[in-house]
Amino acid sequence: MVKKSTPNPDLTTLQRTELEADLVQLKLDLEELLNITEANAQPVKLKDNAGRLSRMDEMHNQSILLANRNVTKNRLRQVLVAQARIGKQQYGYCSSCDENVAFNRLKAYPEAALCLQCQSEVEANQD
């Protein structure tokens, strides 16, 4: 499939600028979240909690935190890919079918690389 190298014509210049700003802000927010949770992502030390249940609770909470951090890291990677797509004039096009991605979808998920139809197909195939 030939990748387009011109801006998505369905997006106005103002919309593109707004979406680029959304990506920058989302990147900052995700990086901040990772920085804030870094200390709690360290292994639980056995001597820090007196009781066995307290350690188990800490380990459970930490496993949830680590899972959330992985989701955050993955989303941050998607944001960086989206920003690179802007530089290549490929942002706003579906990376699967090369059709335009709707502004409302990009506004909700500025890092979206797939149109709604292709995203639905991917999710349906995961079941």
Image (cartoon, rainbow, N blue to C red):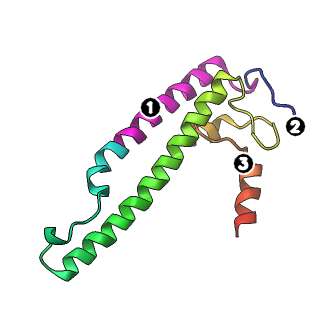
Q: Position of residue 110 (x, y in %)?
A: 58, 37
Graded by Cα atoms within 10 Å as few (under 14), some (14 to 19) or many (20 or more), the crowding at tag 1 reads few
Q: The residue tagged with tag 2: helix, strand or loop?
A: loop
The residue that disc 2 covers is 1
Residue appearing at x 50%, y 31% in the figure: 22
CA separation in Å, label 2 and label 1: 31 Å
Choose the circle earlier in sequence order: 2 or 1. 2
Report x, y in % for residue 10: 74, 27
Residue receiving disc 3: 116
Amino acid carrying label 1: it is Gln
Q: Quick one: 80 or 17, which is closer to the camera?
A: 80
Q: Earlier in the sequence, mark 3 or mark 2?
A: 2
**Residue 88 image point, x, y percent:** 70, 23
Our reading of the magenta stretch's main secondary structure is helix
Direction from residue 68 to residue 56 in the image, left or right = left
- Which residue has dot 1 on it? 25
